[in-house]
Amino acid sequence: MKYLQLLTHEIGTSCNLIHKHQGKCPITIPERYDAVDTHHALTDDEIVSNILTAYSHGFRGMTSWHSYCEPLLYLDRIEKIVAKVNEHIPQQHLLWTNGTLIEKIDPQRLKIFSKIIISNYQKKNWDFLKGIVPDLKILRGHLDDRVTKKRKTRKRCLRLFTEMIIDYYGNYRICCGDFMGTSLSLNTIKDGFDTIIHKHQELRSLISTEPQPYNIPNICKTCSILGRTYIYNLVNLPYYNTMYKLMSDHNLIIEEERFYISNYEDIK
């Protein structure tokens, strides 16, 4: 877990830009939960427990809340979870937002986030936020088209070093391309978050092997997701540069236990 940049819990199931993403973004698909367990939506305390468990396994990246939803629709809930987490560990928190709701809230509430990333659909100047959250990243706003974009590839995937995703109902999603939840069936309530951590590490080793073995999940064989062959530099902690160097090395060591991370004690 010490290489993971983002631990994402889908904090809600809606986005205020659904009408603009119709037919392209997975959030517009009514059946996107049909293949997973929806009996129990994760509570705040269960999300907090997952984050603390991840920390105990060496996670030092950022929590995030976006998945396919717009997290600022659920800012009240995020504030409560962040406050509970911060009572126990010095955790960093990321807000990745479309930005359209920022001017409808008190911007001082955004101080709970260590970093803000805005997909700038509105083409606005967001410099005023730098006085609130110094780490601000603005992305060009491109409407999500992963529902319709398809191509086959056998290239090594590093996506699982970037992010672990737990959906609104506690189901593990192998990545943001697994929007129908068909890659495998694991739920934090039924199977335990420790089990999901171990499975994520196992899959990461399998999928990041090149050439890719035949027994990778079927969804990986037709993947077209951005970030597949490189790692987003979202978390600027000492382990990032070391991890990037290792992942760029032609003699890639897959097993996490064999990695040596200089300065790891500094952030432990």
Image: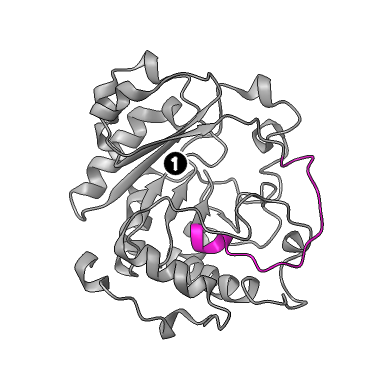
Residue, x 78% and y 77% (percent of image)? Answer: 214
Q: Is residue 226 above or below residue 66?
A: below
Q: 9 or 229, which lies in front?
A: 229
Residue depicted at x 35% and y 55%: 51
> x%, y% of residue 208?
61, 72
Q: Nearer the viewer, residue 116 or 79?
A: 116
Q: Is residue 99 located in the magenta-colored stretch of the structure?
A: no
Q: Which residue is mark 1?
A: 65
Hey, which quadrant is residue 77 in on the image?
A: top left
Give the x, y percent position of residue 14.
56, 29
Q: Please tell me which residue lies in front, 23 or 13.
A: 23
Find numbered disc 1 in the image and state the secondary structure of the residue it sits on.
Answer: loop
Residue at left 49%, top 42%? Answer: 10
Q: Quadrant of the C terminus?
A: bottom left
Q: x, y percentage for residue 259? A: 41, 81
Residue 137 shows in this picture: yes
Q: Which residues are magenta?
A: 146-162
Q: Is residue 2 visible?
A: no
Q: Residues within 10 Å of mark 1 (few under 14, many from 20)?
A: many
**Is 168 rendered above or below residue 126?**
below
Chief SS of the magenta region: loop
Query: Where is 243 relative to 79, above or below?
Result: below
* Residue 156 among magenta residues: yes
Q: Residue furthest left?
A: 87
Quadrant that contains the N terminus: bottom left
Residue 105 percent location from the top left of the image: 34, 17
